[in-house]
Image (cartoon, rainbow, N blue to C red):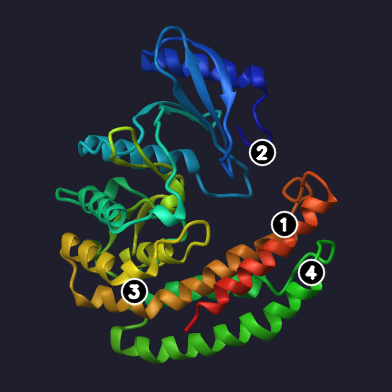
Amino acid sequence: MNTAMPLSDSELFATARRLTRSAGCPAPVMLERLVGGRNNRVFRVATEGGPSLFLKSYFHDPRDPRERLSAEWSFLTYAWDKGIRLVPEPLAADWNHHTGLYAFVTGCKIAPDEVSWTHLEAAADFLVALNAPPRRLEDMPPASEACFSLAEHMALVDGRVARLANLDSNVPYCEQAQCFVRTKLTPIWKKLKHEIEEQGLTLGLTATLDDTETIISPSDFGFHNMLVADDGRLMFTDFEYAGRDDPAKLVCDFFCQPEMPAPMEYYERFKARLFDGLGLGPSHKTRCSLLLDVYRIKWTCIILNDFRTVGAVQRAFAGDDARFERYAAQLAKAEMKLSEVV
């Protein structure tokens, strides 16, 4: 099915019926659209006399090579095979319609001011359990934008900065965004890139990590994708970008992503607990410190993606006021993220 068109309501219900039957679950009686799912459509499936289930209809387009269903299904299957029960159980998948059926995970979102070391400790322990031997790295494809050398990290961000040279002149605050990219973001990146390249020579800029130094990574890892279950356990969701990756990338993303970054006060403790648990040496902690500002630049670029030339559907907003407010907010977020670069 090579189309970006979403399934209709009737097609979704028919898919849910096929998947519940395949999984041996009670038949669906209703689909409730849930908020969230930036790239996908997500639903609570009410069933006949059974528990609620979770249906995820993944974005798919021939122009986007990322197989989101495959990545998430592979990750969850791997985790469940290892006995990890802190993620949704994968139940059934419809590969032709890019749709997956999962157990429904209930819990509460963590407020930013509620994040404590206990939460970061649980997050680190989840990653260690996921990568405990025996590992089957051959079962896991590379994560989205996976990097296995310092040079690949630099090239990744270099490409994102370069793409911001062409912004959509039709969006609000485009001139301000162009000025920000030209006078602040690009010069700071060039300076940082030069410094990293000089420091990276001692670590081997082009040296590729050995398989034993890579991890199976959730990739989009942050408190925005975690829930506190009724029994107090921290539950983890959303793995459509998961796969093999550099552990330094996971740590940097965890502390840099803007939606709900891990508090920097726990940065050193988290690194120590994670890398000690993974059995990785001091060089990996050094890689994190070397790459932290690089990933602050990366997330600045991601925030500014709204200003790039995109399709009208992706730019649809509730109205002009909401549209202007969103672009103003994105530009402010980008300025704030860039200000974190030391």
C-alpha gap between disc 1 and disc 4:
12 Å
User: Label 2, on which residue?
Assistant: 4
The structure residue drawn at horizontal position 82% and vertical position 47%, both measured from the top left corner, is 319
Residue farthest along the front direction in this orientation: 113
Answer with mark 1 or mark 4, whichever residue precedes in sequence: 4
C-alpha gap between disc 3 and disc 4:
33 Å
239 to 155, vertically: above or below: above
C-alpha gap between disc 3 and disc 2:
37 Å
Answer with mark 2 or mark 1, whichever residue precedes in sequence: 2
Looking at the figure, which quarter contains the N terminus?
A: top right
Q: Is residue 102 visible?
A: yes
Q: Residue 135 in the image: state x and y as whole percent.
A: 20, 49
Answer with mark 3 or mark 4, whichever residue precedes in sequence: 4
Q: Is residue 102 left or right of residue 317?
A: left
Answer with mark 3 or mark 2, whichever residue precedes in sequence: 2
User: Label 3, on which residue?
Assistant: 288
User: Label 1, on which residue?
Assistant: 326
